[in-house]
């Protein structure tokens, strides 16, 4: 009997205990009868990653904290989005050439697809890490007029704001701006399991404001619960998580995998177990 030659993919980061990517990608791999396996590569450093990927013949990788920026110098090619953001979340090993992509942008925008958003109203982005910049870049792509970045450490917000037009660094939790926003996006760690809730009140925000929390563990953060309570339109972090994964899968296999309600409830169940 001929044994199958499984090609390996995975997620590179540290820590990876809470990553849902293996559950998701292995589900799609099985569904499409692909001879692959997706696993976790929790590495303390990535000094020899280029040799490792090429020697092991890995098909591709997702990259997460703390390596999204550090990985770039190990790659052979990067696309336009990656160049701008200086962050990679997907590597494709194309016959020995390591290509870097950033699918967080497509993932984030997937969550806004079915939502009516007033692009003339300012958007507030809370946080100023790598995810915040991907969100700013995405909002610029869809034509949101003004973006205010609010971060505990304002200098980090200023650094991003300097790269883009009509993006401004603001003080952490400026309620007047928050109450008049068209969109409020949380990209901080606040609300995540093990972190305090985001100190934002939605009681006085505009009725048309869209709330988007990119935190997906838990799916129902305090911010999302508050948005529901105030009857505001909202998007949970699951949209971005699923969207970026779908886009990575497309890069590796040239297949756009499904996002069925069965799969979504399977992922939600796994998140609850964390
Ligand atoms: P990512 O790449 O996912 O954006 P990150 O770069 O670690 O992750 O960014 C985490 C964000 O959460 C930062 O904006 C951070 O604020 P600082 O720049 O001031 O560190 C924010 N954050 C984390 N813990 C926070 C807290 N307790 N209060 C306010 N902001 C917090």
Image: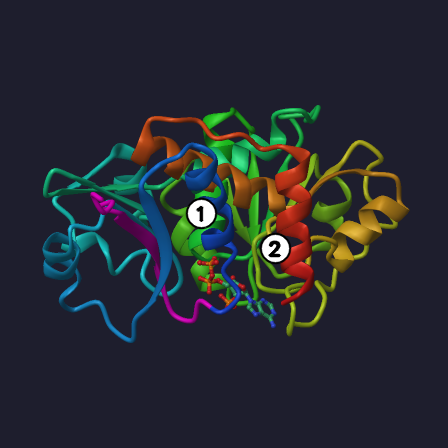
Query: Residue 26 — which label?
Result: 1
Q: Is residue 236 left or right of residue 252?
A: right
Q: Is residue 56 above or below residue 24?
A: below
Query: Residue 175 — which label?
Result: none
Residue 217 seen in this snapshot: no
Which portion, as a residue range, is magenta? Answer: 1-16
Which quadrant holds residue 256?
A: top left
Residue 136 spot, x, y in % from top left: 48, 41
Disc 2 secondary structure class: loop
* Residue at the image point whose x is 38% and y is 70% from the top: 14
**Mark 2 = which residue?**
215
Q: Is residue 11 above or below residue 113?
A: below
Q: Is residue 153 left or right of residue 35?
A: right
Residue 8 spot, x, y in % from top left: 27, 51
| Pick the front one: 67 or 246 | 246
Q: Does the Cβ of the disc 1 residue fall within 8 Å of ligand 1?
A: no
| Pick the front one: 7 or 111 | 7
Quarter of the image containing the C terminus? Answer: bottom right
| Pick the front one: 181 or 250 | 250
Mark 2 to mark 1: distance in Å? 22 Å
* Residue at the image point whose x is 29% and y is 76% from the top: 44
Residue 192 spot, x, y in % from top left: 64, 64
Mark 2 or mark 1: name the one nearer the start of the chain. 1
Does the magenta run of residues contain 24?
A: no
Residue 88 seen in this snapshot: yes
Density class for disc 1 (Cα within 10 Å; few <14, some 14-19, many ≥20) is: some
Q: Is the residue under label 1 in contact with that under label 2 (CB below 8 Å)?
A: no
| Pick the front one: 223 or 45 | 45
Circle 2 or circle 1, nearest the eye: 1
Quarter of the image containing the N terminus? Answer: top left
């Amino acid at each position: 009997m001929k044994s199958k030659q499984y090609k390996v993919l995975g997620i590179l980061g540290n820590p990876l205990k809470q990553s849902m990517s293996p559950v998701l990608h292995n589900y799609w791999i099985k569904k499409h009868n692909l001879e692959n396996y997706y696993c976790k590569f929790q590495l303390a450093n990535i000094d020899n990653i280029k040799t490792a990927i090429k020697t092991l013949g890995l098909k591709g990788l997702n990259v997460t904290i703390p390596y999204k920026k550090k990985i770039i110098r190990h790659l052979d090619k990067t696309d336009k989005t990656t160049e701008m953001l200086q962050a990679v979340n997907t590597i494709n090993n194309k016959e020995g050439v390591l290509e870097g992509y950033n699918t967080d942008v497509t993932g984030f925008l997937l969550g806004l697809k079915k939502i009516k958003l007033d692009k003339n109203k300012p958007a507030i982005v809370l946080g100023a890490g790598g995810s915040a910049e991907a969100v700013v870049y995405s909002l610029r792509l869809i034509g949101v007029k003004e973006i205010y970045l609010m971060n505990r450490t304002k200098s980090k917000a200023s650094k991003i704001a300097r790269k883009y037009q009509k993006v401004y660094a603001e003080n952490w939790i400026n309620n007047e701006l928050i109450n008049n926003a068209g969109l409020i996006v949380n990209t901080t760690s606040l609300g995540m399991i093990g972190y305090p809730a985001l100190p934002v009140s939605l009681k006085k925000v505009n009725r048309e404001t869209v709330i988007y929390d990119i935190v997906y563990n838990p799916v129902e953060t305090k911010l999302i619960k508050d948005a529901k309570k105030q009857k505001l339109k909202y998007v949970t972090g699951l949209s971005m998580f699923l969207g970026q994964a779908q886009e990575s899968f497309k890069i590796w296999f040239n297949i756009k995998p499904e996002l069925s309600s069965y799969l979504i409830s399977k992922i939600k169940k796994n998140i609850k177990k964390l």
